């Protein structure tokens, strides 16, 4: 009798957790298409150097989304790196690349075109959530939780993603207070 090797429960749990987090983040950021599957982030640049993208995943509609997160300014060096990821994804996965950068500093635009070469121009979409909006969402959550009001699915996603996007100096306070409040959350599972 051949015994099939079973992955460690923590390995399976971690993979499932990452998959679900990406699926919810895709929805939360209102990105196009329906999340399908995660892909390896390790890549090989055209000069054969190895690199690692923040996230690659596909949608049911055939997009290959490269989701990056940048805490600093979007520079020429960052755009060059992103263009390498896009070229790699286009070649390796034969899906339509879609490049998105979550910005922690306001890029002051929704998208930008980067000319990698005269024949390859990459469109990069930017997502920036202003701190004022995050604080409004945070205060709304705290009030609803204190008043025992059921949260919608999107509001429950705020619990997960506000700490991710809030400024570093407020991160610990926001994370701890939302974690404490989460114990009394009423979730509307139908929304």
Image (cartoon, rainbow, N blue to C red):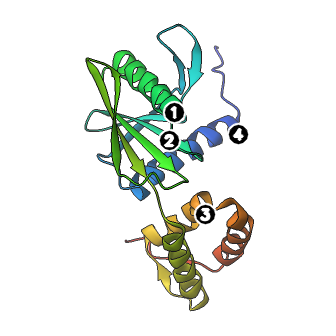
Residue named by callout 2: 74
Q: 21 or 189: which is nearer to us? A: 21
Q: 107 or 136: which is nearer to us? A: 107
Q: Earlier in the sequence, mark 3 or mark 2?
A: 2
In which quadrant of the rendered image does the N terminus lie?
top right
Q: Earlier in the sequence, mark 2 or mark 4?
A: 4
What whole-number distance in Å separates the C-alpha atoms at marks 3 and 2? 19 Å
Q: Earlier in the sequence, mark 3 or mark 1?
A: 1
Crowd class of label 3 (few under 14; some 14 to 19; many from 20; radius 10 Å): many
> Which numbered circle lies on residue 10?
4
Q: Is residue 2 left or right of residue 88?
A: right
Crowd class of label 1 (few under 14; some 14 to 19; many from 20; radius 10 Å): few
Residue mark closest to the camera, 2 vs 4: 2
Q: Position of residue 55 (x, y in %)?
A: 51, 36
Residue named by callout 3: 166
Whether tag 3 and tag 2 are in contact, CB under 8 A, the answer is no
The residue lying at 53 percent from left, 70 percent from top is 134
């Amino acid at each position: 009798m051949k015994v099939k090797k079973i992955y460690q429960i923590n390995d399976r749990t971690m993979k499932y957790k990452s998959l679900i987090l990406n699926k919810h983040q895709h929805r939360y950021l209102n990105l196009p298409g329906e999340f399908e599957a995660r892909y390896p982030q390790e890549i090989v640049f055209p000069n054969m150097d190895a690199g690692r993208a923040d996230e690659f995943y596909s949608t049911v509609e055939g997009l290959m989304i490269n989701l990056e997160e940048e805490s600093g300014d979007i520079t020429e060096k960052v755009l060059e790196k992103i263009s390498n990821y896009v070229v790699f994804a286009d070649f390796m996965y034969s899906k339509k690349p879609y490049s998105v950068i979550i910005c922690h500093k306001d890029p002051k635009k929704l998208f930008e075109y980067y000319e990698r070469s005269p024949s390859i121009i990459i469109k990069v979409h930017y997502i920036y959530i202003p701190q004022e909006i995050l604080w409004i969402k945070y205060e709304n959550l705290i009030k609803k939780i204190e008043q025992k009001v059921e949260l919608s699915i999107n509001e429950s996603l705020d619990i997960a993603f506000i700490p991710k996007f809030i400024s570093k100096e407020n991160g610990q306070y926001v994370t701890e207070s939302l974690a404490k409040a989460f114990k009394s959350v009423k979730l509307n599972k139908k929304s």
